[in-house]
Amino acid sequence: MQRIFGSRDFYYLWVVQLVSALGDWVGLFAITALAAQLSSAPEAATALVLTARVAPGLFLAPLAGVFVDRFDRKKVMIWSDLARAVVFMALPFVRSVTGLVIASLLLEVFTMLWSPAKEAVTPSLVPRKKLTDANSLSLVAAYCTMPVAGGLIYLLTAANGSLANISWLGPLQFSNEMGNTQALAFYFNAASFVVGGLIIWKLVRIPKHALGRHVIGDERVLADALVYLGLAEQYAGDLSSARRRFEECLPVARRFGDRHLIAMTLNMLGQLAVQQGAHEEARRLLRE
């Protein structure tokens, strides 16, 4: 697992992507099929629903990353998954193309919040040399689930027909009537997003520094200030003061788990130790 995914945490995040992507494709097929069933102009209804899935990205994408960066990214992913689950739970009760368009818009908005949050935390979950592999695995999860979803939507529609014969399940909208054959697919999608949210909540450990500026707060500001002061004092030739600044910065950086800042601080302390003639200490610091 470590060799392929880089870390256990990214593996769990990848499983979430796999489950969510499968649910997303099933949901897209089910919504477009339902739109075609409900409308007297199926081609136009399908086009409207697909446009609703694309349009938010054209207008809101630049704002999504800024919004996500202001909140806890892990919580953004969890709540986005749960919000999509709620939308899919409501879809079996929708009986108009307008309702499907609104649902599609909402699904895309929550997807736009989830995706930049995932992209922002991924570099903190895998070593830098594994980042390209991580991006490739994300693409595999996103697109290789499409043919699986095609077969799954057929099975879910068939199973929906069997459940329609159980009278006490009637309130859940299982039916063989036109426009009601996608209910089980929608419930499957809702379940996939609930499972994804639970995995992120319980199993994906995201370093504090990767959760967003709102979570790091004053600690990151303090660490950055100490680094800049240390560099300025080193440039001015005050090596002792510079060393104190980097020594103060190190525990702060370790508290919120920024591996790059920790590595840079240790490197600077090692350089200062060499400049001050403490070669043994320099070797120790560079080994950390």
Image (spheres, grey):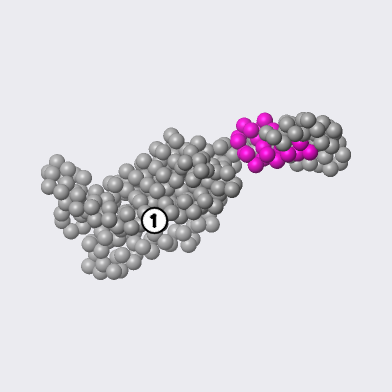
Magenta range is 250-271
Q: What is the x, y in percent for residue 80?
A: 42, 45
Residue position for label 1: 144
Find out whether residue 263 is within the magenta segment: yes
Residue at image position (85%, 33%) is 277
| Residue toward you, 105 or 116 | 116
255 with respect to 206 (left or right)? right
Residue 22, percent from left and from top: 35, 51
SS majority, magenta: helix
Q: Position of residue 235 (x, y in %)?
A: 84, 43
Tell me, yes or no, if residue 86 can be seen here: no
Please tell me which residue is depicted at 36% across the width and 41% down the height of the picture.
Answer: 194
Please determine whether, in this image, residue 285 is positioned above or below residue 184.
above
Q: Find residue 147 and report its image quarter.
A: bottom left
Query: Which quarter of the rendering shows the C terminus?
Result: top right
Amino acid type of the residue tagged 1 in the rendering: Cys
Decide if residue 172 is in sight here: yes
Name the secondary structure under disc 1: loop
Of 124 and 241, which appears nearest the observer?
124
Crowding at dot 1, Cα within 10 Å, few <14 / some 14-19 / many 20+, comes out as: few
Label total for image: 1
